[in-house]
Amino acid sequence: MDYRVIKENDVFYLSDYQGMALGRHGLFSRDTRFLSRMQWSCEPDVLVLLESEAVSAFDSVYRYTNEPPSEKSSIARESLLITRHQWIGEGSFHEGLTIENFAMDPVCLRVSYLVDSDFADMFELRGFDSHRLNRNIAVEHSKTACTYRYVAQDGRINETRAEVGVSCTFAQLDDLAGWSGTKEDATQRRWQGRMRLEPRGQIEVSFSVFINPVDCQCGEDTGPTKGFERIAASHEQWLSKMPKVSGCLRYAAWYNQGLRDVRMLQSNLGYGNMIVAGVPWYAVPFGRDSLIAARQLLLAAPEVARGTLWTMAQFQGQEDQPDRDEQPGKVVHEVRDGELSRIGLLPFAPYYGSVDATPLFLMLLADYYRWTGDEVFLRSLLPNVERAFRWMQEYGDRDGDGFLEYWQEAREGIANQGWKDSGDSIMYADGRLVEGPVALCEVQAYAHRAYADWAEIYSALGMTGHAQRMRMQAIRLQDGFNQQFVQADKRIALALDGHKQPCLVTSSNMGQVLVSDLIGKEIADVVAQLMVSPHMLTGFGIRTLSSAEVRYNPLSYHNGSVWPHDTSLIVYGLRRYGYLSEAIAVIDSLLRAQDEFDQHRLPELFAGFSREESLRPVPYPVSCSPQAWAAAIPVFILEQLIGLRPDALRQSIGIDPVLPPSMTQLEITGIRLGVGILSLRMWRSASAVDIDIIENSTGWVVCRSPYVKGGVPR
């Protein structure tokens, strides 16, 4: 990862490792770049970077000292300490610059900030050059402030205002300091000031950027410092509610970093906290990504699932609009707010091109209810549930065969509408790309799980007619799947094409089929062994495509790379079906991978080289980090280690603890289930993993019960 990101709510700053914004960097909000350039300099000496640290999700620190460019310099070597502290405020960006003189003599310096703003849409920065707009940007500057203003084609007013303030202690700032234009570019502006620092003198420069439409202008009582303190307190408050993990420093470090990244990715569109897909390129709500990440987080933060579900319900499809792949009841794929989407050059405001978001919505709501017992919220979404099932049966199943299929209708939309959404990710055994409409194997598993879950929930709610219809749909789908997807050698086809011909390739998709009870033991045995075979399991995770396949490429996006979230879902499936040793082997591979990444932060994806080919995971060039469903993995894996299966319907908590060989004990306190708390300790004994319930205020009965191969007892 060759960039640094700090973020709070809808605003994030993307920079290099010295906090400078160049190229595709900048200050972003709502898919718009409000600051396209930010360069800082201090002359005449050359500066040496001492420290570059991401202090938290929303602030970072850079420290320098001086190295004179020649022996004739009047400034003693390493006599200056320069600290730049950057943070995201409430709709703003701030840098606090402190210069301290430890020399015995006065020093004279020249400090400058060079800024620019282009109000580019995120898609323009990602290479959509055919849609690049010519923008007329107005620029004004005074001695203390510089303002950029642009009226978008839909009338939205965008504004960026940069301000500089200076405070001196045993130091002076010349009267000519202020903003001016530059010869290099018509819209660039530079703030420059000459400073004199006495011995032990100090100068503090505050550089602030306020943006509109999310401008939060700070008054006397709510200045940048107080804003920083409020945001820091909100992070601490959120983290304090999370379950605590101890007993294994390695796992605790991974888990805690994941929680910090989840807090960074939180956003709120007015319907409760949810997490956006990832920074820097996907800092918006994504149906599939946000729903899966929310499910992964249930053990730690069930309120994220609630906010995600409520947000998805507000954007549920209302009409049949082919230009954005929308149909009534369909759950949204992504919600973009950039200019290109708002004026219709791209179909993403919002866009509905995913076949799996709708069953994932139904699965998450069912699981949220099992974990929380929140029947009031469940009932409030019953109309959305009914519309989602109607979409699955009337629009998602295009030909009435019981399978969910996708087909791109939007001209600028996405061709492959499962989670592997790159253009070459679904293929036949000979490498030819699939011909649609396409029915993906894992999507049928999601649909089956949704039908089965809701058959039980409807029955508990006394809605017996609905429950019976769900059971019939689940049985029909299961029968059809085993007839058409399952092959004679008991392998599962990646997909069925538009002619119902199977794509006979070994991929991770079949591993995700284990998240439901769609297949029996004999077929599941084959799937489990394939997932841990050398062609699939690299030692750092499970490949998206077997290394034995024609299109295998370890450096590709979806055809042989490792996506940690994909691997974690397969672990979940392996545990559900009782494949303990296989699940532990895959968990160990993820633990090994996170050891090798900075701050224990698993990225969106990495290359699919095996441990024999590379001692460490090889990064993917444009992988997002942090990414929601990668950040949430340590929470999700913790659930698999405990074997935790809460069930509000039965007022019970199933557990089946396991520990990988590298771990001897774990203690987890503060898991919120129902209206109470569950805390427990797991440790390895001579022949098993023992468990002690430290606290159970849920009122639910804890039962140690193993998973069973061929199905999961409820």
Image (cartoon, rainbow, N blue to C red):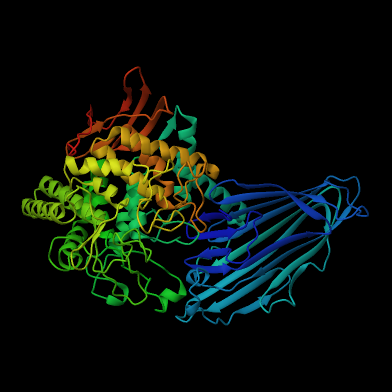
- Spot occupied by residue 284 in the image (x, y as percentages of width and height): 42, 62
- Farthest residue, direction right: 72
Residue 646 place in picture, x, y as percent? 25, 37
Taking the image as shown, residue 152 lies to the left or right of residue 521, namely: right
Residue 272 falls in image quadrant: bottom left
Please name whichever residue, 207 or 709, is drawn nearer the observer in this view of the structure: 709
What residue is drawn where x is 48% and y is 79%?
130
In the picture, which quadrant includes the C terminus? top left
Please state the horizontal and vertical placement of residue 150, each as a whole percent of the image. Answer: 55, 78
Residue 408 lies in what quarter of the image?
A: bottom left
Image location (x, y in percent) of residue 169: 80, 51
Task: Report if residue 373 is visible in the image.
Answer: no
Marks counted in the figure total 0
- Viewer-proximal residue, 685 or 557? 557
Q: Quadrant of residue 162?
A: bottom right
Which residue is nearer to you in this view: 700 or 594?
A: 594
Left or right of residue 364: residue 553:
right
Residue 614 visible? The answer is yes
Q: Residue furthest top?
A: 686
Q: Residue at x 13, y 54 (%)?
A: 483
Q: Is residue 132 above or below residue 400?
A: below
